[in-house]
Image (cartoon, rainbow, N blue to C red):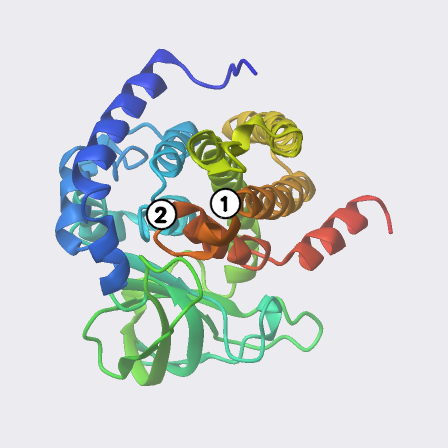
């Protein structure tokens, strides 16, 4: 269906992204999967092309165009090529907004040039063992000691944690008996700081090209000038950014579901069974027609949500709705497409298998489908 979301500038950026992905990402992608990450040099290449600094102000080396649609284009082009861009999505869409919204002038001068040119990699450390989606239940603490904060605690499932130069850590700096959401603070922990160590690199069923780590803080000393935003206000900051994070997951879900259909169409046209192409069977046609309809429904919902987000009007409940629908749709579509590959769909040499394993986490991270339903139900007065 016709889309009205993008301008000529976005389409020009799409061409840049497509060329880069085809030349620099696709040929090397199998090696990156085996190595568990995208090489740092590739981040620098993307930074050199201006792809990482679109939203960063020009005075710090960026393009000064904080338009979320450029991020959408980048995700769509990666999915179309049946790859993902490692932790780039997390850095641009989940982490960078915290720096853009809450960094002071000194921090901007110190960090923004490296974020724009790809020499500074980032991670955000929220999730803790045993807490899951209960952000207010974080047990990592930070105690003031002169001009430092002393941080103690553990974080897990941290995307990009092994490579990150800057880690935004959510820690409890005070306790309010009447409001457990108060007292959380964002602290930027830098690589090499005393007391900060990286633990295990976790082995996942999917998303093999990005590292996921456990992080440990034992009397880690973080300078007070590394506090991001105001002390004790992190819960509100997290809530402000979560709609975009959830929208980001939905963008990937729709784009990857669309790619699954394209892969299934190509395969079933070539693959023969009982002397005829699998694509000629009525069941194949009906399955792909149904999948295509689901993707178009998800795309329409998603494009509306992206437009609202660009206008600054996307609500938390609507972000939850679009994430819930698009990720659940992705699961159904990719599963049905894989079925059309038969036994070959179970083999990792076919991209449909990677699309299948990568898709599973979409219903978990950035808030599970169940958490999305809770948010939606609250918006209904339930």
Q: Which residue is mark 2?
A: 96
Residue at the extreme right of the image, as rendered: 382
Question: How far apart in space, not on screen, are marks 1 and 2 (Cα)?
Answer: 39 Å
Q: Is residue 38 left or right of residue 219?
A: left
Frontmost residue, 58 versus 366? 366
Q: For marks 1 and 2, give the one nearer the viewer.
A: 1
- Which x, y percent locates residue 70? 37, 29
Quadrant of res 65 = top left
- Which x, y percent locates residue 157? 44, 69
Q: Residues within 10 Å of mark 1 (few under 14, many from 20)?
A: many
Residue at the extreme front of the image, as rendered: 275
Element marked by disc 1 = loop
Name the residue: 63% across, 42% down: 329
Q: Is residue 370 above or below residue 89?
A: below
Numbered tag placed on residue 341 in the rendering: 1
Frontmost residue, 108 versus 279? 279
- Which x, y percent locates residue 375? 72, 51
Q: Is residue 68 above or below residue 101?
A: above
Quadrant of res 325 = top right
Name the residue: 49% across, 19% down: 5
Numbered tag placed on residue 7 in the rendering: none
- Sequence-wise first label, 1 or 2: 2
Q: Is residue 268 left or right of residue 324?
A: left
**Does residue 169 appear in the picture of this structure?**
no
- Which x, y percent locates residue 244? 51, 43
Q: Residues within 10 Å of mark 2 (few under 14, many from 20)?
A: many
């Amino acid at each position: 269906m016709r889309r009205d979301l993008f301008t000529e500038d976005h389409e020009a950026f799409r061409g840049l992204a497509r060329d880069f992905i085809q030349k620099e990402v696709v040929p090397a992608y199998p090696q990156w999967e085996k190595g568990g990450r995208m090489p740092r040099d590739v981040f620098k290449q993307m930074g050199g092309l201006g792809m990482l600094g679109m939203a960063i102000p020009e005075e710090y080396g960026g393009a000064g165009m904080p338009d979320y649609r450029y991020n959408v284009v980048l995700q769509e082009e990666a999915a179309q090529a049946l790859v993902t861009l490692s932790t780039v999505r997390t850095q641009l869409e989940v982490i960078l907004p915290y720096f853009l919204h809450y960094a002071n002038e000194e921090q901007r001068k110190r960090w923004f040039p490296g974020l724009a040119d790809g020499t500074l990699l980032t991670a955000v450390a929220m999730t803790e063992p045993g807490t899951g989606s209960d952000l207010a239940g974080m047990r990592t603490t930070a105690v003031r000691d002169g001009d430092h904060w002393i941080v103690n605690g553990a974080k897990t499932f941290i995307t990009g944690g092994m490579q990150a130069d800057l880690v935004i850590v959510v820690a409890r700096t005070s306790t309010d008996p009447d409001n457990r959401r108060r007292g959380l603070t964002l602290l930027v922990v830098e690589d090499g700081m005393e007391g900060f160590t990286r633990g295990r690199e976790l082995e996942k069923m999917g998303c093999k090209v990005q590292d996921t780590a456990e992080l440990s803080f034992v009397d880690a000393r973080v300078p007070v000038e590394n506090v991001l935003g105001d002390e004790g206000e992190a819960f509100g900051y997290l809530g402000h950014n979560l709609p975009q994070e959830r929208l980001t997951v939905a963008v990937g879900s729709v784009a990857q579901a669309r790619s699954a259909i394209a892969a299934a169409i190509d395969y079933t046209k070539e693959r023969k069974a009982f002397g005829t192409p699998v694509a000629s069977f009525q069941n194949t046609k009906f399955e792909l027609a149904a999948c295509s309809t689901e993707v178009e429904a998800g795309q329409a919902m998603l494009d509306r949500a992206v437009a609202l987000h660009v206008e600054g009007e996307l609500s938390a409940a609507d972000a939850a709705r679009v994430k819930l629908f698009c990720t659940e749709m992705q699961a159904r579509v990719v599963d049905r497409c894989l079925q059309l590959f038969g036994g070959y769909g179970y083999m990792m040499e076919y991209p449909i298998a990677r699309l299948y394993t990568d898709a599973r986490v979409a219903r978990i991270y950035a808030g599970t489908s169940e958490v999305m339903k809770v948010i939606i139900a609250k918006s209904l007065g339930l």
